[in-house]
Amino acid sequence: MPTDATAWGRHCQNAGLEYMAPHDLRHTAASLAVSAGANIKVLQKILGHKGATMTFDVYVDLFDEDLDMVTARLDEAAARLGTILWNTRPA
């Protein structure tokens, strides 16, 4: 791990931050993209991975956190669809 003597370490220190590796920032950016609903193929291109499998294998745990949100949205969509279907049935 680099020390405060490195340029990056000095930048972190000057910003009042604990040391973090540049790769940590990359992981954070990818995590935020996943949370924002980024498509795995888009994320793959952003990160420069050769294939989506690598991206998915590294960040799959982040997708699990969104399951409750996806389930809630599907429930809402199903409820809206049910309302639309119910209101358009012939009498």
Image (spheres, helix red, strand yellow):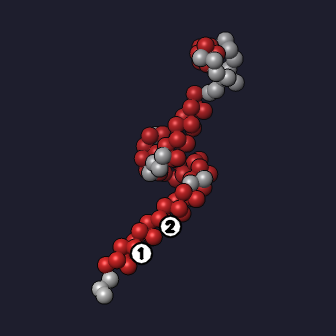
Q: Residues within 10 Å of mark 1 (few under 14, many from 20)?
A: few
> Identity of the amino acid at label 2?
Asp
Question: Measured from the top left, where is residue 5 in percent x and y?
Answer: 67, 12
* In front of the other: 48 or 61: 61
Question: Measured from the top left, where is residue 3 in percent x and y?
Answer: 69, 17
Total labels: the figure holds 2
User: Is residue 85 left or right of 56 when viewed as pictured?
Assistant: left
At horizontal 64% and vertical 21% (from top left) the residue drawn is 17
> Identity of the amino acid at label 1?
Gly
Q: Quadrant of residue 1?
A: top right
- Asked whether the beta carbons under mark 1 and mark 2 sit within 8 Å of each other, the answer is no
Q: Quadrant of residue 13?
A: top right
Is residue 47 in view?
yes
At horizontal 48% and vertical 46% (from top left) the residue drawn is 36
- The tag on residue 82 is 1
Is residue 6 in view?
no
Question: Measured from the top left, where is residue 56 in percent x and y?
Answer: 54, 51
In the displayed structure, 82 sits above or below 21; it is below
Which residue carries the number 2 mark?
Answer: 75
At horizontal 50% and vertical 67% (from top left) the residue drawn is 75
Q: Quadrant of residue 14?
A: top right
